[in-house]
Image (spheres, rainbow, N blue to C red):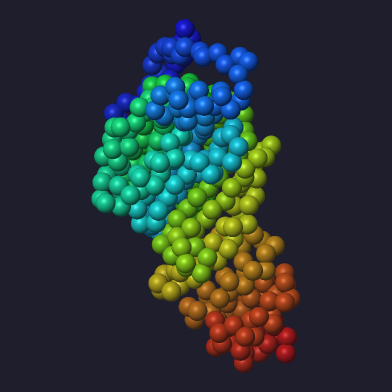
Amino acid sequence: MSLLFTAMPRPNGSCAPRRRALISSPRRSFAGQSPFLILLLIALTAPSGWVAAASQPIATFSIVGYDPDTGDLGVAVQSKFFAVGAVVPYAQAVVGAIASQAFGNTTFGPFGLGLLAKGLAPEAVLEELLAADSLREQRQVGIVDAQGRAAAFTGEKCMEWAGHLTGENFAAQGNILVSEETVAAMAQAFRETDGILGEKLIRALEAGQAAGGDSRGVQSAAMLIVRAEGGYAGYNDRYCDLRVDDHEHPIAELRRIFNIWQEHALILEGYRLCDENRYTEAFATGKRMTELYPRSGEAFYHYACYYSKAGHFGRALNELQRAVKRDASLGERAKKDTDFEPLWEEGMFLEIVGR
């Protein structure tokens, strides 16, 4: 009998270690049998839920989060597990986000989101998901809804260190971790990071890894964020769907591709704010773009568009000049861009874009 320490949740969302024992199951011997017969015998004799129990545990740390400003909902996850993004994260715009891990139950995502959509609170959803699950003590689940309410569960048979923390707009959880510091660091990073939801989620992963992370190492990472009509051309809600299935440094690689995605996302965010006449916030978004991507002509170009749309033509020309210096082709685009129509006949505009 091997003794492990796992962290069981307190009512206030904090975690405390608790001693427990794991009892070994009787072993079956299939020596000399054909592979087909072995599979048949397993299928006929295994108890309900044998497929999940026989699967590799998804030793993971993850965070589910909500952005009350944009309504975005998302999940970020890292694991010593191949293609973790195909198994752990689930989210539905205007409804909620769910992470199902340890011995992950892939029905928890769609079923749980369906319950959230019916108006159940995250705690009630957890109760429904776990009530009829014979392997509930091997599950770990984090849930956040579109009101920022969060709930999480860590089963007693999740392998050490296992536990979770919940707070306003997030739930952070992990199992087979170096220590509880991973979850605490994720929670702190989410609370303290400014910017869009994706930045908060990836900072949480980076902080969790820096604090110890998965005790077995790293392999894959993923981020899923949903927004109503936020997908390509508005046809679906899949605003951000990034996966690193197998990599020596999966979080660093996720950061690299997230940065590529983020530039485009910030551009669109600036236009959204302009459309809502929230120009001060649009300018702040544009400034952030140019700070994050100082070599990108696109960042300065769209920053100029925000100023032009607001009628701040002097600032628009300054930023457009910076854009064209970085990418001369943007001058030709500006000649046809209606955001700059009030400037088309201005001398400085013509000098910048070429006559």
Foreground residue among 255 and 239: 239
Q: Residue 197: where, in percent of width, then height?
A: 47, 52
Q: Residue at x 54, y 61 (%)?
A: 265
Q: Quadrant of the C terminus?
A: bottom right
Q: Residue 327: where, in percent of width, then height?
A: 72, 72
| Tally of numbered tags | 0
Q: Residue at x 49, y 58 (%)?
A: 239
Left/right of residue 54 with respect to residue 278 in the rendered view: right
Foreground residue among 99 and 190: 99
Q: Residue at x 35, y 44 (%)?
A: 112
Foreground residue among 288 and 212: 212
Left/right of residue 78 with respect to residue 52 in the rendered view: right
Name, please, the residue furthest toward the top: 1
Left/right of residue 170 with respect to residue 256 in the rendered view: left
Please say if 131 is above or below 70. above
Please say if 79 is above or below 202. above
Q: Residue 81: where, in percent of width, then height?
A: 58, 34
Please say if 68 is above or below 271. above
The answer to which quarter of the image holds residue 39 is top right
Q: Is residue 308 visible?
A: yes
Q: Is residue 102 visible?
A: no
Q: Residue at x 59, y 32 (%)?
A: 80
Q: Residue 100: where, in percent of width, then height?
A: 44, 38
Please say if 245 is above or below 52. below
Name, please, the residue furthest toward the bottom: 345
